[in-house]
Amino acid sequence: LTSLTVLSLANNHIGLRISNILTSTSLKYLDFSGNRLDIMWDSRRDQYLHFFQGLTNLTQLDISENQLRSFPPEVI
C-alpha cells in the first residue's frame, strides 16, 4: 500500500499488536481513536513506545477515546 494516505483503524479496541511499530512513507492521516493505547502504553511495558514513529509523513493522528489518563513522554 505504497500510496495509502488516509487510514482509519478507529473503534477496533486494539490493545496489542504483533508488530510494535507502524511503518509508512505515504500515510498522512491515521484515525486510531476508540482503541486501547492505555494498554499499549502501560508503564510496565515499553514495546509500543515508538508505535507511530515509523509513519514518516504523518501530519494528523487521532488518538481520542483511547482511555488515556497520561502517556510516557517517549511516545511523542
Image (cartoon, grey):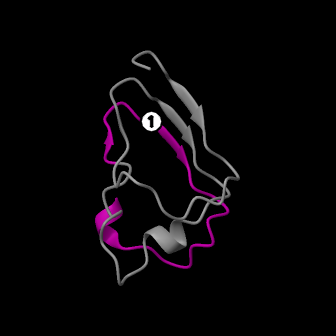
**Where is residue 56, by image quadrant?**
top left
Amino acid type at image mark 1: Thr
Membership of 44 in magenta stretch: no
For the point 54% across and 65% down, the residue is 15
Query: Outermost residue, top direction?
Result: 3
What residue did someone put label 1 on? 59
Return the residue nearer the eye: 3 or 29: 3
**Looking at the image, which residue is at 43% across and 73% down?**
71
Q: Is residue 1 left or right of residue 63?
A: left
**Quarter containing the N terminus:** top left
Q: Taking 54 as reference, is 1 above or below it?
A: above
Dividing the picture into quadrants, the one containing residue 30 is top right
Image location of residue 52, percent across then percent down: 38, 49
Magenta span covers which residues?
A: 53-76
Q: Position of residue 55 (x, y in %)?
A: 35, 38
Prevailing secondary structure of the magenta residues: loop
Q: Secondary structure at mark 1?
A: loop
12 and 66: which is toward the camera: 12
Q: Is 19 or 35 nearer to us in this picture?
A: 19
Identify the residue at image location x=49%, y=77%. 70
- Residue neighbourhood size for the residue with mark 1, other residues' Cα within 10 Å, grouped as few (<14), some (14–19), many (≥20): few
